[in-house]
Amino acid sequence: MKSILLSLAAVLSLAPGPVWANADRAVDLISHPVGYIAIAIFVVAYLLVILEERIHLAKSKPMLIAAGLIWILVALAYRAAGANGEVEEAIRHNFLEYAELFFFLLVAMTYINAMLERGVFDQLRIWLLGKGFGYRRLFWITGTLAFCLSPVADNLTTALIMCAVVMAVGRDSAKFVSLSCINIVVGANAGGAFSPFGDITTLMVWQKGILPFQDFFQLLLPSIVNFLVPAALMHLALPKGQPSSPESFGNVIRPGGLVICALFLLTIATAISFHQFLHIPPVFGMMTGLGYLKIFGFYLKRHEEYHWNEGFESPPGDSSGDRTQGRRAFDVFSHIARSEWDTLFFFYGVIMAVGGLGFIGYLGMISATLYGDLGPTVANVMIGVISALVDNIPVMFAVLTMNPAMPDYQWLLVTLTAGVGGSLLSIGSAAGVALMGQARGQYTFLSHLKWTPAIALGYGASIWVHFLVNG
């Protein structure tokens, strides 16, 4: 049992936490029963997350409890040693990281919900169906769009957008939705790996000055291979035929839909500009963008209410025929309320629980083993595998904290593996976790797990291509 716990500790040790948590600790919990119990709590919670489809327990519930229990154990151990201040500082550090992620995701989800309510994705669905595309062609179109949009937007936002399109287009085929969601997760993660703006991990590497901006684009070819290999294999399992055609091919976008799309692009540009030119965290740009939507939402609500008061049965331009829906004026707060709260609270549980394990001190225990004994190549490949179990953000944070001495092509390798390794499991990336909530019941942990061997083949092929081109 002890050896199993130590192995799990090694896997989970790549967790965010203050650097000082690994040195000059007031309390050594690495070999303490508190450390082993904390690992056991985390593992049990993650098993419940994996079994969500079977036991119908929302994934956020066990992780919230696990986070609380882990920090309670750590706080009790430090209180007994008279070192309460360190625990409080560590909790604030990890909670701040979560707060930035929370508000970033909340704004993105609010825009997605607003575009859904305005019929933007229904219009895209009608356009795609009007072209007569079959399931297989739609599979490649949505996956390719995810790969191409991810370097500009982030991979999470891209995955949310394309998943909404897939669910609208393939609502009659659960198998198509499931395979397309897997393809979107792989494509979005692969597309985000070769751009400093495509993933938070690449952003961290670039921001720290490890690699110059242009060097990331050396990962373009490996990223393409990472996307194409599993997509080609999944293509063989796709249903034949095409989705049922809509009753009409007219305009279904409600008033303001296209303006909201433009505001969303402006919000993304604001977030990038805040970071690039002002050195402000991107989340502040996203929150500014939420202000754009609120101001426009105020105008849109007044505009619709005016037309209804003038005797219109539904808003002008609304061809849905649903007068009950037409009577509900645009309300930003209603779209915020429809965000995936289970997903957002799940992220809280993961970040705080993993942060607690990192504070215990397992990071320093294995840093020498990974990059000293095993060497950078093996270590960086393992980083990608670990990122399938633990979100790649804390994994990359841990690598940057270690700051091992490596040539640039090895830093490119760990950037690639940390970015695309999360595709191996649905819980390995923010895109996968978010899509499990958005396509609940159709894209699940187990449906993704069935295609892990194919994704792993693409993972290995991308590493081989990287060494062939850049090594």
Image (cartoon, grey):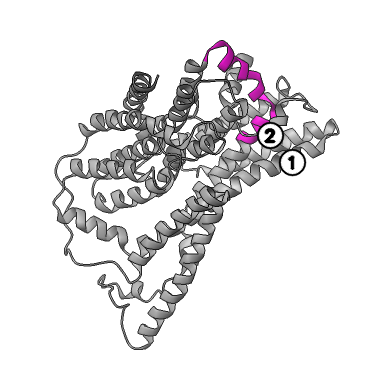
10 Å crowding of disc 2: few (<14), some (14-19), many (20+): many
Q: Could you tell me how far apart the alpha carbons at marks 1 and 2 are, in whole angstroms?
A: 9 Å
Where residue 301 appears, as percent x and y from the top left, is 43, 76
Residue located at (31% from left, 26% from top): 454
Disc 1 marks a residue whose amino acid type is Glu
Q: Nearer the viewer, residue 106 or 44?
A: 106
Q: Which image quadrant for residue 25?
A: top right
Q: Which of 379 and 136 is in front in this view?
A: 379
Residue 401 painted magenta: no
Q: Which image quadrant for residue 257?
A: bottom left
* Cβ atoms under marks 1 and 2 closer than 8 Å: yes
Where residue 126 appears, as percent x and y from the top left, is 21, 58
10 Å crowding of disc 1: few (<14), some (14-19), many (20+): few
Where residue 234 appears, as percent x and y from the top left, is 25, 32
Mark 1 residue element: helix
Q: Nearer the viewer, residue 83 or 177?
A: 83
Q: Horizontal placement of 88 versus 439: left or right?
A: right
Q: Horizontal placement of 400 versus 468: left or right?
A: right
Q: Is residue 61 above or below residue 83?
A: below
Residue 89 shows which numbered tag? 1
Where residue 223 appears, as percent x and y from the top left, is 35, 31
